[in-house]
Image (cartoon, rainbow, N blue to C red):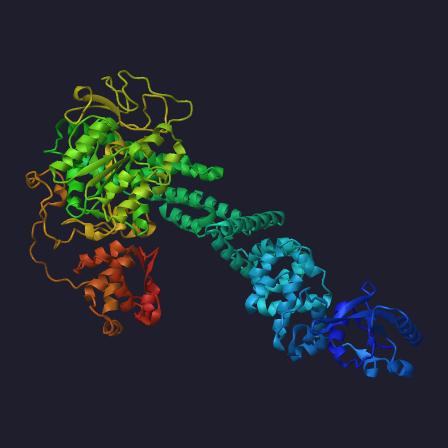
């Protein structure tokens, strides 16, 4: 007989008959070369067009006698009108009696390609499907035809279209190919994790497996064959995790030993090194995209997070069993790799700030850092920041004024980092815990020295300080007059009193609020304002004194009357709202009366107790992190103020210290205890100071208060206030506005870089940005008070350090300006040509100064800092810094290359130094 006859099933027979029934001419016997499947149905119907169907009986025989018997039996049987006999009998053996009954009078050879054309409704097939290596494809398409049939093509059925249809059905990837899309490794890796997916591929005939593998290698890349071979070996569910391990073939840790270990993990897959490297890169790309999905919101991000964790934890387990953990220590995806980076950070913290900074950079570059471990990364950053601070010059206290201003500008940020380190990292290994403790304790010792020095200065200052002679510092009773009243000349402010807000909390809130670009921080003195609380620094005294504009003691009624009276004396209506007057009825966040007040022209004050209540009833860990959303009603109030175009004065009445006593310790026994942090007894112990004078509003002007954070006189709580520590006595004052246009005469926007201490950000630690003095304003001066204008501050009074005259020096010989990067750029012919296409081009020295400021800061500055650099170099004040940056992009972004761009929701400006030098063809080795 020769070659083996083809296996035929119902689908092949149906396809064959559908193409041949038009030529039956009334004949009812069809002989087909082949063998019908033994488990196939022997009777069924086939379509003949126009919705009609014919009933068919199918049988198989291997002899002429069998053919005759089958035909005679068919004629004697009612029901089916068409007999199909599959056989391997040659046509020349068949008698004339049967030939006369046979369709086409011959045994029909199955042409699978014709059947496929009919199944797809195609005019023709891609010629490649009729020759090696694709001869298997038509048969596979016939067998794999879905219940609803193949999609109809009409035109030529291409090889790729046929393979997309086949792979979609065989592997369950139909949705991937919708709209003619191609498959990629992402889809295959997702498929490898679906229940039954790899098993479906393993169950296919060998020729079909190889054909699908070859096609996917062409369309999805070199990684596809590795994945499919893993699926064949029953390791499909581990395929993505194994791809992570394959990175040992590409990283710095690649070695012969690692390759051998990897081979044992992959088993008999038989992949070449180049395939494994391609597979590792493909898996890393897929994981990167999954992590990006995990960073979003909604159910899809939750699913992506779980998928990523499942894969990477599985990869860590496989690495451990194969002794590859050390070789993969630098892997940017594995959780064990993240732990290894933190372990290196623990070592680097003891080596020095530069080493610690480099180690932290490596930690935050891990692909899981931002999405899966943000709090751990931020905590590590706080430790590195403190390491920078500890490496700086030993800080000193020279006066109350200097200490309070420095606390808001610098030491309060230290407190912020210390609070987080005190809470710690519950998942940290012992070495990291010890490293954090070492940094924390060193910084705490330095801070304690500052608190003790501040208390020494506070004693004599308290005896003489008054509104007339404040000693160069803002008193809490003057905050409304000095800060809020000038704002009211432009637009009545919303005064938000965050009871108990320390400088550390203010640092975090200010950073968050100005970081998203919705709020601008303003200042009348070139820095964030700071005031001194009353003594003792408790709510009953400090809050009433703040809101009444004069030293006073009292509760809510005193505050309401005093607040309204202060503003009435200065020509403004005002209303103050306390805790129970803030929440609105069902369906409303804020009380309608409060909303109406904010929409009016009156000055509005609101007291928020969230921080102080947390000190009394909260957990210590909750006091280390004060995001805006954690301060109840604060987001809603800020949004209301912004919607009405109001500036906001965010102020405290006093700060607080956290409970840092060890376990089992209780209150300190002392005489005359009145509160957690002040008493009337006169016997002074270590860590305490006696204060007397007009600034002391209790016990006839004399109290004993602790400067040490370790002392409290009442049962333990999460935190305390009332003492003489810098964190309690310093009152931070933030002025926020939706637009810099609301700045009063002589005020200016504070660049973010001038608010943060130089050691807070690594890029600015090398080149701190100083806010320029406020530029003269063209706005008319308005009379904001009926009171007599204050005399010019005398020596030692408020802000005198900003008003010291500078002696005029004799003219020095002209020194050529250094050839900075900015100067080089603006002196090129390319820059000159670019300027011809830009209207109102800024002065060259202004553009050069901005380039140099960006370059000095490491390439990134806030919009406010860019505007400040422009003004400092002689440029005009820009009410819309974004517009100025747009002009810069037109000047510097040659041929669309991003030399300058807006990033972080258009709140910061980035300079690409390398692209700048390349585009302006600057010589190598120059500045």
Q: Residue 68 versus residue 843: which sits nearer the camera?
A: 68
Most distant residue in the right direction: 65
Q: Position of residue 399 (x, y in %)?
A: 18, 35
Give the tally of numbered discs. 0
Q: In the displayed structure, would residue 262 be above or below residue 834?
A: above
In the picture, residue 895 is in which quadrant? bottom left
The residue lying at 11 percent from left, 45 percent from top is: 803
Q: Nearer the viewer, residue 804 or 792?
A: 792
Furthest residue in direction top, as rendered: 671
Residue at image x 72%, y 63%? Answer: 204
In the image shown, does 173 or 600 lie closer to the viewer? Answer: 600
> Does residue 510 appear anywhere in the picture?
no
Whole-percent x and y of residue 11?
A: 74, 68
Q: Can residue 826 be seen in the rendering of this structure?
A: yes
Q: Which residue is drawn at 30% across and 69% down?
A: 922
Dividing the picture into quarters, in which one does residue 552 lie? top left
**416 sits to left or right of 84:** left
* Figure quadrant of the C terminus: bottom left
Residue 732 screen position, x and y as percent: 24, 38
Q: In which quarter of the image is the N terminus?
A: bottom right
Q: Is residue 15 left or right of residue 388?
A: right
Name which quarter of the figure residue 54 lies in: bottom right
Where residue 55 sits in the image (x, y, percent)? 79, 69
């Amino acid at each position: 007989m020769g070659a083996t006859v083809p296996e035929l099933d119902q689908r092949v027979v149906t396809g064959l008959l559908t193409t041949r029934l038009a030529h039956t001419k009334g004949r009812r016997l069809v002989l087909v070369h082949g063998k019908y499947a033994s488990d196939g149905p022997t009777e069924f119907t086939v379509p003949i067009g126009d919705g009609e169907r014919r009933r068919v009986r199918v049988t198989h025989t291997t002899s002429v006698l069998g053919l005759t018997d089958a035909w005679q039996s068919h004629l004697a049987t009612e029901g089916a009108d068409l007999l199909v006999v599959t056989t391997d009998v040659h046509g020349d053996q068949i008698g004339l009696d049967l030939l006369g009954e046979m369709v086409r009078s011959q045994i029909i050879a199955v042409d699978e390609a014709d059947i496929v054309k009919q199944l797809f409704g195609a005019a023709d097939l891609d010629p490649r499907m009729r020759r090696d290596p694709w001869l298997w494809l038509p048969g596979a398409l016939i067998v794999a035809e879905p219940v609803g049939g193949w999609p109809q093509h009409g035109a030529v059925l291409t090889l790729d279209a046929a393979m997309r249809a086949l792979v979609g059905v065989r592997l369950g990837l139909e949705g991937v190919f919708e709209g003619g899309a191609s498959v990629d490794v992402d889809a295959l890796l997702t498929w490898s994790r679906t229940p039954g997916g790899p098993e479906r591929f393993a169950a296919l005939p060998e020729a079909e497996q190889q054909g699908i593998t070859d096609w996917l290698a062409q369309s999805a890349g070199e990684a596809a064959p590795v994945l499919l071979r893993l699926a064949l070996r029953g390791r499909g569910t581990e395929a993505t995790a194994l791809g992570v391990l394959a990175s040992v073939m590409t990283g710095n840790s690649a070695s012969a030993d690692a390759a051998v270990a990897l081979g044992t993990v992959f088993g008999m897959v038989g992949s070449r090194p180049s395939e494994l490297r391609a597979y590792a890169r493909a898996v890393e790309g897929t994981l990167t995209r999954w992590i990006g999905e995990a960073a979003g919101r909604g159910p899809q991000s939750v699913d992506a997070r779980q998928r990523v964790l499942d894969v990477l934890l599985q990869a860590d387990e496989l690495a451990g069993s194969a002794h590859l953990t050390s070789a993969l220590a630098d892997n940017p995806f594995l959780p064990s790799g993240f732990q290894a980076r933190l372990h290196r950070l623990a070592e680097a913290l003891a080596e020095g700030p530069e080493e610690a900074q480099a180690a932290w950079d490596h930690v935050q570059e891990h692909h899981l850092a931002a999405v899966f471990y943000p709090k751990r990364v931020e905590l590590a950053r706080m430790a590195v920041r403190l390491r920078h601070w500890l490496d700086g010059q030993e800080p000193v206290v020279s006066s109350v004024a200097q200490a309070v201003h420095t606390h808001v500008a610098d030491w309060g940020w230290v407190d912020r980092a210390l609070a987080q380190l005190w809470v710690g990292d519950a998942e940290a290994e012992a070495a990291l815990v010890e490293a954090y403790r070492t940094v924390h304790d060193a910084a705490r010792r330095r801070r304690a020295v500052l608190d003790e020095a501040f208390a020494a200065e506070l004693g004599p200052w308290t005896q003489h300080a008054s509104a007339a002679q404040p000693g160069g510092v803002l008193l809490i009773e003057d905050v409304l007059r000095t800060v809020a009243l000038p704002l009211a000349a432009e637009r009545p402010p919303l005064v938000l009193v965050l009871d108990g807000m320390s400088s550390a909390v203010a640092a975090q809130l200010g950073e968050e609020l100005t970081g998203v670009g919705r709020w601008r921080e303003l200042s009348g003195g070139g820095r964030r304002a700071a005031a001194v609380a009353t003594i003792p620094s408790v709510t009953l005294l400090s809050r009433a004194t703040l809101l009444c504009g004069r030293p006073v003691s009292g509760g809510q009624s005193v505050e309401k009357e005093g607040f309204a009276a202060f503003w009435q004396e200065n020509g403004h209506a005002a209303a103050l709202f306390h805790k129970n007057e803030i929440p609105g009825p069902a369906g409303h966040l804020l009380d309608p009366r409060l909303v109406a007040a904010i929409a009016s022209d009156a000055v509005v004050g609101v007291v928020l107790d969230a921080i102080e209540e947390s000190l009394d009833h909260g957990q210590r860990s909750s006091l280390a992190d004060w995001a805006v959303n954690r301060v109840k009603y604060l987001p809603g109030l800020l949004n209301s103020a912004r919607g009405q175009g109001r500036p906001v004065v965010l102020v405290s009445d006093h700060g607080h210290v956290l409970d840092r006593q060890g376990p089992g310790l209780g209150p300190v026994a002392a005489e005359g205890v009145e509160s957690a942090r002040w008493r009337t007894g006169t016997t002074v112990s270590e860590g305490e100071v006696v204060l007397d004078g007009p600034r002391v509003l209790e016990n006839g002007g004399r109290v004993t208060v602790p400067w040490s954070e370790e002392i409290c006189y009442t049962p333990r709580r999460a935190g305390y206030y009332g003492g003489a520590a810098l964190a309690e006595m310093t009152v931070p004052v933030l002025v926020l506005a939706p637009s810099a246009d609301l700045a009063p005469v002589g005020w200016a926007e504070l660049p973010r870089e001038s608010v943060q201490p130089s050691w807070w950000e690594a890029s600015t630690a090398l080149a701190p940005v100083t806010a320029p003095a406020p530029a003269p304003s063209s706005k008319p001066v308005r009379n904001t008070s009926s009171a007599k204008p204050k005399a010019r501050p005398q020596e030692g009074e408020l802000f005198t350090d900003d008003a010291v005259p500078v002696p005029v020096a004799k003219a020095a010989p002209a020194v050529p300006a250094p050839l900075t990067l900015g100067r080089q750029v603006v002196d090129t012919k390319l820059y000159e040509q670019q300027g011809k296409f830009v209207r109102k081009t800024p002065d060259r020295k202004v553009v050069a100064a901005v380039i140099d400021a960006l370059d000095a800061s490491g390439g990134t500055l806030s919009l406010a800092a860019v505007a400040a650099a422009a003004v400092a170099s002689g440029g005009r004040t820009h009410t819309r810094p974004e517009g100025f940056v747009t002009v810069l992009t037109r000047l510097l972004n040659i041929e669309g290359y991003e030399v300058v761009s807006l990033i972080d929701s258009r709140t910061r400006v980035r300079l690409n130094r390398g692209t700048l030098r390349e585009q302006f063809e600057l010589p190598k080795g120059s500045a």
